Amino acid sequence: MLLQDKKRWRFAAGLVAIALLYTAFVLYFDNLHFVEATSRGVRHVIRFATMLLTYGIGLMVFNRVYPVWLVQLWHIGYLGILGLLLLLGIYDFWTQGLSVPFRDLIISVYEFMVSPVPFVVAGLVYRLAGARVTSS
């Protein structure tokens, strides 16, 4: 199999995996019944695990056949935002001191990070950077 075909297959498989993970999260863990039935701490753990899975899927896709700079971009983007969200989640878990609008903003950032959007953006950055290098 050609390297370009392998990249496309890996990207498509990663996109499908992240889309399925995001869909499962939205259907099972982001509904009012689940929110009312669980504690905030349990929801923090589930969100953390979901974000780690999304990060891991992207890492598995980009790690072997994509350039090192794209893998580093993936690390910096996900681990930076994950660290920030983790600190805010720990603070909220222990103090319950974050306001509702701020928690809603954090949840929106989280949902963006586990959605397929960052994965697609990383793929587009790779394509655009590759097109720039070959056209120069």
Image (cartoon, rainbow, N blue to C red):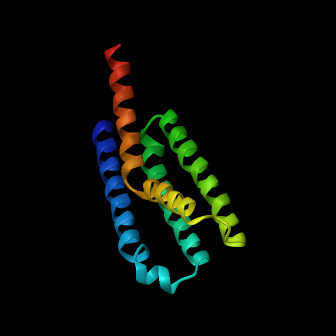
Residue 35 vertical placement versus 1 (above, below): below
In the rendered view of the protein, which quadrant contains the N terminus? top left
Q: As rendered, which of 61 and 24 lies closer to the eye?
A: 24
In the rendered view of the protein, which quadrant contains the C terminus? top left
Residue 134 vertical placement versus 50 (above, below): above
The picture places residue 65, in percent across and down from the top left corner, at: 42, 40
The picture places residue 6, in percent across and down from the top left corner, at: 32, 44
Q: As rendered, which of 112 and 100 lies closer to the eye?
A: 100
Residue drawn at point x = 33 percent, y = 37 percent: 3
* Quadrant position of residue 90: bottom right
Residue drawn at point x = 39 percent, y = 27 percent: 129
Residue drawn at point x = 37 percent, y = 40 percent: 123
* Quadrant position of residue 41: bottom right
The picture places residue 100, in percent across and down from the top left corner, at: 55, 66
Residue drawn at point x = 58 percent, y = 54 percent: 82
Residue 64 vertical placement versus 55 (above, below): above
The extreme right residue here reads 94
* Left or right: 115 as drawn, with respect to 40: left
The extreme bottom residue here reads 37
What number of labels is visible?
Answer: 0
The extreme top residue here reads 136
* Left or right: 52 as drawn, with respect to 41: left
